[in-house]
């Protein structure tokens, strides 16, 4: 079986962001792996992405270490998220763009399992997703009925 290549995606508008959102759906992470650098105006997260593009109906299933980077960040807010607990685990269910009245600015919202979210205020959509490691097997496919 030929494995799909590692992903490197860039989003510059709402449509592009939907593609990245599909790729990171069900990504697992630790709160300590989310870093906001206000000087660089960047929020980055190291995530363990489920490889939907490689998954068959009954497996095999894989995850891969990836970096999600959001640029041109003006501020970050969270709701029902323990950002101060570095070992707390999270799962990304969705990512969407909510434009301001003065587009292209707005907010990129990461919806997390358990009902929390991280809201990233941005000047414009400027997001990259880069796989940075080799895939590894995982026994289960994410089950959305559990979230």
Image (cartoon, helix red, strand yellow):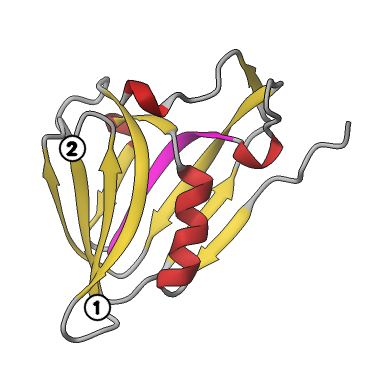
Region in magenta = 40-50
Q: Quadrant of residue 46?
A: top left
Could you say where residue 103 lies in the image, as x and y percent from the top left? 25, 84
Q: Seen in the image, is 24 located left or right of residue 137? A: left
Q: Label 1, on which residue?
A: 105
In depth, the one of 72 and 62 nearer the eye is 62
Residue 40 in sight from this viewpoint = no
Could you say where residue 129 lies in the image, as x and y percent from the top left? 52, 53
Disc 1 secondary structure class: loop
Question: Are dots 2 and 1 in contact, CB under 8 Å?
Answer: no
Whether 103 is drawn above or below 89: the answer is below
The nearer-to-camera label among 2 and 1 is 2
Q: Seen in the image, is 3 located left or right of residue 46? A: right
Residue 116 shows which numbered tag? 2
Q: Check disc 2: other Cα within 10 Å, few if <14, some if 14-19, many if 20+.
A: some
Whether 109 is drawn above or below 64: the answer is below
Going 60% across and 13% down the picture, which residue do you hit? 139
Question: Is residue 48 a member of the stretch shown in magenta?
Answer: yes
């Amino acid at each position: 079986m030929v494995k799909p290549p590692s992903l490197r995606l860039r989003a510059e508008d709402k449509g592009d962001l939907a593609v990245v959102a599909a790729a990171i759906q069900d990504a697992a992470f630790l709160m300590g792996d989310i870093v906001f650098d206000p000087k660089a105006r960047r929020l980055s997260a190291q995530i363990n992405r489920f490889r939907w593009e490689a998954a068959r109906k009954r497996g095999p299933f894989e995850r891969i270490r990836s970096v999600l980077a959001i640029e041109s960040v003006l501020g970050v807010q969270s709701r029902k998220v323990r950002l101060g607990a570095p070992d707390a685990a999270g799962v990304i269910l969705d990512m969407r763009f909510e434009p301001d009245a003065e587009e292209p600015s707005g907010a990129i919202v990461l919806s997390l399992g358990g009902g929390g979210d991280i809201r990233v205020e941005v000047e414009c959509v400027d997001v990259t997703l880069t796989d940075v490691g080799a895939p590894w097997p995982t026994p289960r496919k994410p089950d959305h009925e559990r979230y």
